[in-house]
Image (cartoon, rainbow, N blue to C red):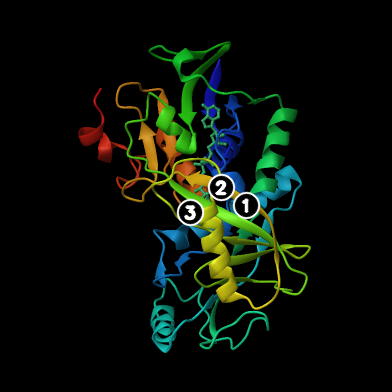
Amino acid sequence: MLDYIVVGLGLSGIAISSHLEKRDKKFVVFEDNSQESSKVAGGIYNPIILKRFTLAWEADKQIGYSIPFYEELEKKLNTKFIQPFNIYRRFHSIEEQNSWFEAADNLRLAPFMSTQLVREVNSNISGDFSLGKLEKTGAIDTEKLISANRDYLKKHSILKQEKFDYSALEIKDDFIIYKDNKAKNIIFCDGFGVTGNPFFNWLPLRGNKGEYLIIKSKTLKLKQAVKSSVFILPLGNDLYKVGATYNHKDKTKEPTTEARIKLQNDLDELITCEYEILDQVSGIRPASADRRPLLGNHPKYKNLFVCNGFGSRGVLIAPLLSEKLLNFIEDEIPLPPEVNIVRFQRKHYKG
Ligand SMILES: Cc1cc2nc3c(=O)[nH]c(=O)nc-3n(C[C@H](O)[C@H](O)[C@H](O)COP(=O)(O)OP(=O)(O)OC[C@H]3O[C@@H](n4cnc5c(N)ncnc54)[C@H](O)[C@@H]3O)c2cc1C
């Protein structure tokens, strides 16, 4: 008898399976590469919303938990995937500069926002109003993180690289059976794939498509990230990620011409040097109706759980919230009401 079956190995499934291992639980993970959100993500960790200079939901608490979590994972997997760098926010007006200083006065924001404005971060970045500098920020190379986790789970024979067929799940009172696996519980970490999951597709998960360009520029020589209407992130070897877009209507998987043109226009407005577009990637962010995670227990089946709804901030949210889900399952510690799926049950669950 296994303790758990986990469906999905994106940021959510990675966090859950790491915590399960630490708790000495027996589990298997199913992954079919049907969703790309975690793989194509910019991987940025930054607690500040750079449009309004406000703190993202509970992000100061999450960053204090998540970075040590990833550091520990780096050691376990013997792979480096944390890339610390400053993020520079290009200002478009004096009013924006003033709002930055006002925000930096806030005790929860102050540790991340420098009050020394920067005149120029790189001669290839245009702008008349200086830049604000964020500290203690960076990115997780999510492709490396996923591939190192996949190899680790494969080595320990606990990864099943196949589609989890929801219709083949047999639910008994105290356990579940899936093909030749018997487990006490199952946790669905299936991202936007949950829309095809008959047990949890009643949840109001809207999905938000995001696209990035990968560009090469030998002249740019940028070592830190810059945010204007788009982010530009250094990948090393003269490569950069440029993005991302937000589209809550288009739920197709493929990159679009519309997004390429938008990103290219935004980039042309930001940098003054030549570049070449090498690639374009896209994924669907699992964004919930009220922008809070979707965690909890199925209303009818006590051994079915969901760990989803991380939207555009999975890097910081997944490690802490997945731990809260396990505290709930294993130790009966109640979930914070704002993330518990019970909040949607009355309106959306039709039993
Ligand atoms: C363009 C873009 C940029 C982003 N940038 C950032 C960023 O800079 N910082 C940040 O914090 N977040 C960012 N995000 C958001 C972040 O990627 C998400 O919060 C995160 O990916 C959610 O992880 P998840 O594991 O819940 O979902 P997913 O990554 O979608 O993972 C779900 C997994 O389940 C698997 N799966 C689904 N159904 C099945 C099935 N039936 N059987 C087997 N396997 C299944 C899928 O293949 C997938 O691997 C970005 C997202 C996008 C699209």
Q: Secondary structure at mark 2?
A: loop
The kind of residue tagged 3 is: Arg
Residue 141 x %, y %: 66, 53
Of residues 251 and 261, which is closer to you in this image?
261
Q: Are marks 2 and 1 in contact (CB under 8 Å)?
A: yes
Q: Is 210 situated left or right of 200 in this image?
A: right
Q: Is residue 4 visible?
A: yes
The mark lying in front, picked from 1 and 3, is 1
> Which image quarter: residue 344?
top left
Label located before the other in sequence (3 or 2): 2
Residue 280 numbered mark, or none: 1
Residue 58 x %, y %: 41, 59
Residue at 39% over, 86% down? 95
Of residues 131 and 7, which is closer to you in this image?
131
The residue that disc 2 covers is 255
Label located before the other in sequence (2 or 1): 2
Task: Measure the alpha-carbon separation of dots 2 and 1.
Answer: 6 Å
Label 1 residue near ligand 1, CB within 8 Å: no
The kind of residue tagged 2 is: Pro
Task: Measure the alpha-carbon separation of dots 3 and 2.
Answer: 21 Å
Residue 313 numbered mark, or none: 3
The kind of residue tagged 1 is: Gln
Residue 112 x %, y %: 51, 73
